Amino acid sequence: MERNYPLHQLTTWKIGGPAEAVFWPSTIQDLLTVWQRAQKAQIPLWLIGRGSNLLISDEGLPGIVVITTALRSIQWEDYRVQVGAGYSLARLAQEVGERGWSGLEFARGIPGSVGGAVVMNAGAHGGEMAPLIQNVTVLWPNGTIRKLERAELKFAYRSCSLRGHAWVLETKLALSQGNCEQILKNMKENLVKRIANQPLEKPNAGSVFRNPPGDSAGRLIEAAGWKGKTIGEAQVSDKHANFIVNLGKASSRDVLALVEGIRNDVQSKYGITLQTEVEYLEAKS
Ligand SMILES: Cc1cc2nc3c(=O)[nH]c(=O)nc-3n(C[C@H](O)[C@H](O)[C@H](O)COP(=O)(O)OP(=O)(O)OC[C@H]3O[C@@H](n4cnc5c(N)ncnc54)[C@H](O)[C@@H]3O)c2cc1C
């Protein structure tokens, strides 16, 4: 456990104040022990994977922030993989592809953890997590560990019924037989597209807003004239308007001001209320 830990080091946006304490469990038992102690002492608990979909308040977070990245167990079976929540999704996609197993081609450029990808139903290039998930082992809010089959879960665009409710500990994914060369080629092409279209050279958290039904958030933001606009050190990317980049020392306040400005302007110009895809974490008052 480390105290007074700068959370900006744990997010891809490089934004966030200090956590009172952070903890990296390397086993499910370690995680459970901390969870039980915190519950008993009524200490606030937060869960973070690879911090690629998060805006953390400049004031930081009270209590204990649990980071899943050391939960990296992995077991391979025939076209099935049982993998810990903290495993890198991009790395898993590459390893699955090298075996000639198909299904995770879409995920090679998504910088999250497997657990984060399950609860976000992460997806891209026409693929998503939901159809691959065979079961998920979770820490349930009452402190029990349960294995849930896919039929017990609800998935929709970038959402899963577990989000904000249960902690994903591991999952079993079912892949299918494919052609290794073709899979690796597809992944490479997807990465090339990302490099061309996304401002990956500056800290960011991927798409800030969800795409509204039948439209694209980036198109609406650009049409409303926000591309390139800056508040403090946060900037609406001039490469992709649904990305906000950190120019150096952006604060969560800078990002929130851009988010609010965009939302109000798009609402008044086009009558569409954009919903954020990134999640904002702040101390509850
Ligand atoms: C450059 C870039 C490109 C991206 N491209 C895509 C894309 O193409 N498609 C896409 O879907 N996303 C994309 N993202 C967003 C992000 O990578 C995904 O949403 C990813 O699934 C988040 O995983 P994470 O581990 O980083 O989660 P975090 O950001 O750490 O957490 C996000 C939320 O998930 C919760 N969470 C994390 N782990 C667990 C767990 N084990 N159990 C329960 N809850 C958990 C957290 O509490 C938090 O509420 C992109 C991000 C970046 C920076």
Image (tube, rainbow, N blue to C red):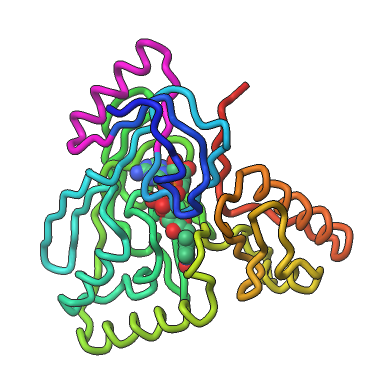
Residue at coordinates 20% horizontally, 49% vertically from top-left? 72
Q: Which portion, as a residue range, is magenta?
A: 24-47
For the C terminus, the quadrant is: top right
Q: Is residue 212 magenta?
A: no
Quarter of image, res 98: bottom left
Of the pair 184 and 13, the residue shown nearer to us: 13
Where residue 231 appears, as percent x and y from the top left, is 72, 54
Task: Please say whether residue 7 is visible from this viewpoint.
Answer: yes
Q: Is residue 39 above or below residue 58?
A: above
Residue 62 position (above or below residue 90): above
Query: In the image, is residue 111 above or below residue 187?
Result: above
Q: Is residue 40 magenta?
A: yes
Quadrant housing the N terminus:
top left
Residue reaching furthest to the top: 41
The reply, left or right, for residue 258 in relation to residue 181 is: right
Give the residue at the far front of this rendering: 248
Of residue 113 and residue 214, the one placed in the foreground of this image is: 113
Name the residue rendered at 28%, 41% in the picture.
169
Which residue corresponds to the image point at 63% horizontal and 52% vertical from the top-left?
Answer: 276
Q: Position of residue 191 (x, y in %)?
A: 40, 79
Say whether residue 177 is left or right of residue 220.
Answer: left
Say whether residue 121 is visible. no
